[in-house]
Amino acid sequence: MKPFYLITLSLILHIGNSFAQMDCFFEGTTTTGTGCSDWNLYSSLTPSNTALKTVRLTIHVFQKSDGSLNIPASAVSWLSNTVEGYLGSGGMQNLKPMKLATSSPYYVDSRIKYDIVQVLFHKQDTVWEKDHLDLHWNNVYKDYVEMNSAVTYKYNSIHVFLPGKISLGQGRAVRTGNKSYNVCLGAYHRYTAMTNEAPSLANLMRHELGHNLDLRHTYNENDRCSDTPLNCNCWNNYQCGSCYYCGTCGCQTTCLPAYVSNNTMDYNADENALAQCQLHRMHANLMSSTGNYQVVTSSPVTKTPTIAGPACLTSSSSYVLTNHEFGTTASWSVSPSSAVTVASGCGNVAVLAPKSGASGTATITFIMTYGKHGSKSGSFTFTVNPSITGTVTSGGSTYPFYGGGNHVDATSVTAAIQAPGATSFTWTKTGGSGTWYTYNSGKNLSLTLSSGGDISFNITTTNSTCGTLSTSCYFVHLGGYYSFYPNPTTGDLYVELLEDEIEINIPNDEGAIKKEKINLGMEKLSLLDKNGNQLKEVKIDNGAKKATISLAGLPPDVYFAVVKDGNRLIESKIIKN
């Protein structure tokens, strides 16, 4: 919309002669975020992910009633084109690198644009001569904004008051984070020196608008941003201002260039740099419900978070919210939480490590919150400690496949294995003996062992989504070391341990063959029906090599006797006559 102007009436006073910005005043406070709401802890983002926020400005020029020392009505284009241009291309869309050391990434485009939508001229001598410390600017706002029918955007623009008397570059914002109005002095004196002072007025306006959008001075107070460097409040190479932070500067009479800030929220001749935390605060304020919250021309479009990170978590790794936007808070959670250890990370980055012994999949969910505009969540599922898994079937029972020892209770064995995304596996025999073959691209094994025999393999896949995975394993027929008799039986069933220790050859993690001793024993003996329901259980004394369980009173049928030995189960089919 093209800006337009209106002239109203009133009184007079006189002027000073300095263009330097010397002081600034504002009221009110806001609290800093903590934890993952603290933007100081966030990692860098891609600015273009953030939709451009266009902020409406209404300019109020106060004139003397006698017509002298006034910005004329013909200066509308100077304000709406020249000054607005320096607000944008000279600042918000063309930020400069921070002169002082900072942890903040350098962002050229703030993704905030100021648009002067209306210029109003008011002939009012009393307001023309006011300074920034006057306590009655709220009354001016009421009279010339709220009660003024000529104002097009009363509550959906930031109102900038330009009194004419004071020449110093001083200003005032209504309060930190409130987008109602601000005051910028010295506009007339900048207009009369318009060949080089339009940027100076734009700098002052950009500084006061920063206060409107929740920024504080960086040089003398807690501005809630750790990436804005403390400084001596030096006005370029001239005399130091009030010494709030001496540090290495020492507040010399003349400031050295190395100590001069160019941050928008300091007092300096540039005011054209912003840190990441400051940009987050400004955008967050524009998405909040504080003071004239409808100043932005359009509401942001909430986006579903997109997440980048490894599909397989094998070591400490980062999961990044790739479309994070300025001003949005980001939080994340992992389910199940027992799968990972949180190494570090906050907000838009999570650094996770797999917990020892954890396996399977886990899901990380990011939530991106757009202030009063709501939130969106997005998830990413990954594999924790990826490995080759599967099942082993022997003697009518199915057990989990272990990359290590697989103790079977029958000589006939089949195995089915899998790994994330893998389409084929290679089995290489590394020890022992048995008759075997694989099929279905190595996903299945058929194996026949001798009684009490063992065999070992190295299994590899090179085409899983987690890259190359391998494991060493062995199969040992423990059923050959346990005797179940009589079978069939009409009453008691006896189980006897034939050996309490056996020795087999297995490959280590490097593929070399080593001997391993397996201690055998019996902890308890259970009797199951053919549907797997437990009918009886007998606890076995430690070190006992023989146990008895009775089938008396049970109808003739097929049953299963199961010996538990540590985490091993040895099962045998029993016929009751």
Image: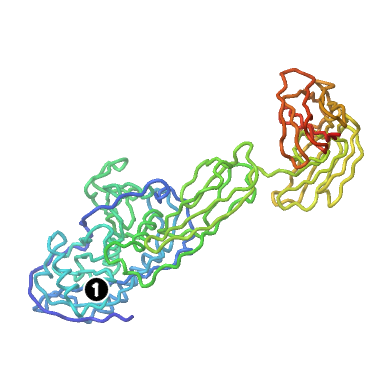
Which residue: 20% across, 69% down? Answer: 161
| Whole-percent x, y for residue 473 in the image | 79, 36
Q: Position of residue 202 (x, y in %)?
A: 29, 67
Return the residue found at the far top.
543
Pick whichever, 387 or 263, lies toward us: 387
Residue 446 appears left or right of 536: right
Q: In which quarter of the image is residue 450?
A: top right
Q: Label 1: few (<14), some or many (≥20) within 10 Å?
A: many
163 up-or-down from 246: above or below: below
- The quadrant in which the N terminus is found is bottom left
Q: Which amino acid does label 1 sit on?
A: Lys
Whole-percent x and y of residue 395? 83, 38
Foreground residue among 512 and 173: 512
**How many labels were placed on the picture?**
1
Q: Which residue is drawn at 56% across and 41% down?
A: 338
Query: Which of the two residues, 91 or 451, is positioned nearer the viewer here?
Result: 451
Q: Which of 117 and 548 is in front in this view?
A: 548
Tag 1 residue: 154
Quadrant of the image containing the C terminus = top right
Q: What element carries label 1?
A: loop
Q: In this view, does 81 lie above or below 272?
A: below
Relative to 285, 382 lies left or right = right
Colouring of the image: rainbow
In the image, residue 55 lies at what x, y percent?
34, 69
Q: Left or right? Give the position of 352 relative to 525.
A: left
Q: Residue at x 21, y 60 (%)?
A: 172
Above or below, comparing residue 562 to residue 75 in the picture: above
Relative height, residue 547 to residue 306 (above, below): above
